[in-house]
Amino acid sequence: MVAHTGSARAARTARRLNAPRPALVEGHADGTPRRVNRQDVAVVREEWRVVDRWWTDEPVDRRYFDVVLETGENAVVFRDDNGSWFTQRA
Amino acid sequence: MIAAVVIPAFDLRAALRLRPGLQAKPAALAPLPGKEPLVGSVTGAAQAQGVRPGMRLGEALAMCPGLELVEQDPATAEQAWEEILRRLEDSGFAVEPTEAGTVYFETKGVERLYGGVEPALRRALASVGSSWDARAGAADRRFAALAAANVARPGQALIVSDDRTRSFLAPLPLTLLPLERERYEQLEELGIRTIGQLAGLPGGAVAERLGPAGHRAWSLAGNDPAEQDGRVKPRRPATALHETLEFPEAVGNDLTLRRGLGVLVDRLLARPERAGRPPRKVAVWARLVGGASWRRTVTLREPTADPARLRTALGPKLAELPAPALKLRLEICELAEHTGEQLELLAAEGEVVRGKLREGLRQVRAAVGAGGVSTVVEVAPWSRIPEARALLVPRDD
């Protein structure tokens, strides 16, 4: 696996694989995504919820959507409990 | 005999092909952006007003306020030069180009074909074309042939026999010798202005004062008949395979350019003339908005006809385009001789595979720096949170 080079320090630090990346998502009134990164959503294939670590200071509460965009591309996006949208390979 | 054909100020002539009216006016090649502001080749009219190639731009403009600066057009020059070389090769000359505007060939193989050295040279000049004002020289030595071509008039062929070489070279200026500018100045300060004057000096003193380059120039000046300034090594005729894509409007978008390149790669690889041979050297050429041109050549580490690998090798070059492109062309400059690839009889395994992997990783690390190679370590594959399942741990072993 080849990664981008960063600073020498950053280069030697272990980092999370598949960390969420901020996404530009416009949603419907019911909370489902309408546009993802300026591409229209053709169909929402699946939807699920992840609630975890509720016993810690950093609880996880995410609503995931597996969508197909109009371009034919597949994408997985989620909305966290703060209302921010992210994209991630599930 | 060795023959030389010279086209003075070839780069400027090539750049002026689309503006022939400027040939008779004071004009000079403009410096390249980001480079030292020195003018390139100049026209005869500019030279008559005191402008010299390599002069500072400010000085040249002060000397000749009406000086027209012509934008360099390296791709057109390269293309025009290639066309000239092909015409010479079509006429039977096995050419060795040294720089754009200078080419050597042996007359031995074509003397009988054309009926002597002079008819052969005339044929070579005709192959180059009259619009280039080419001139030819022939002698038993390479340097003498070049000197003869440099002093000949446009369209003239000058032949120097071996016994006359020394007397022919004697009155010629030192600038014909391959020396650095400081060395010319040094010699001029000593009152030495001609090749004959240099040849008259003791060799040991020249070597001591001017170093090895000076001694070589002294030998070329005619002092050492045993000094062989190299036989002609003909080039292997280039392959003429190219595909062009013209855009309806100027394109600067990387994605569109890459797609265009992908189409060109597919089209070029489908050409039957390739006869299954993989390209070894390819060039991407673009005509830019405003008329300038751009060209990059890539020599592949391993010849390949795999479209994906060719796209990977050529794609990053497109990022160097200085302006949007109107036309994109892909050329195969050289094809490999083989049509197949020697595969291993037995698949590598064990230590051999690990050795190959280590070498591959070493190369990646050398290319992208420390931390460029990581291992995926699963820490909680069962987790419902995707980013908690694995870590990327850098490895430098």
Image: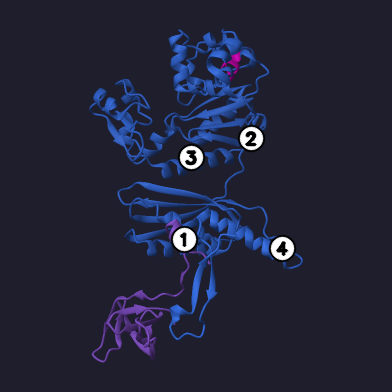
Chain colours: A purple, B blue
Which residue position is annotated with label 4? B352
* Image mark 1: chain: A
The answer to whether one can see residue A58 in this image is: yes
Residue name at image x 31 percent, y 80 percent: A85
Q: Quadrant of the N terminus of chain B?
A: top right
- Taking the view exactly as shown, the residue that stands out farthest to the right is B345
Which residue position is annotated with label 1? A11
- Marks 1 and 2: CB-CB under 8 Å? no
Which residue position is annotated with label 3? B81
Residue B162 drawn at (x, y percent): 64, 16
Q: Quadrant of the C terminus of chain B?
A: bottom right
Of badges 4 and 2, nearer the viewer stands 4
Label 1 to label 2, Cα distance in Å? 50 Å
Of badges 3 and 1, nearer the viewer stands 1
The answer to which of B321 and B374 lies nearer the viewer is B374
Q: Residues within 10 Å of mark 2 (few under 14, many from 20)?
A: few
Label 3 to label 4, Cα distance in Å? 48 Å
Query: Callout 1: helix, strand or loop?
Result: helix
- Marks 4 and 1: CB-CB under 8 Å? no
Nearer-N-terminus badge (2/3): 3
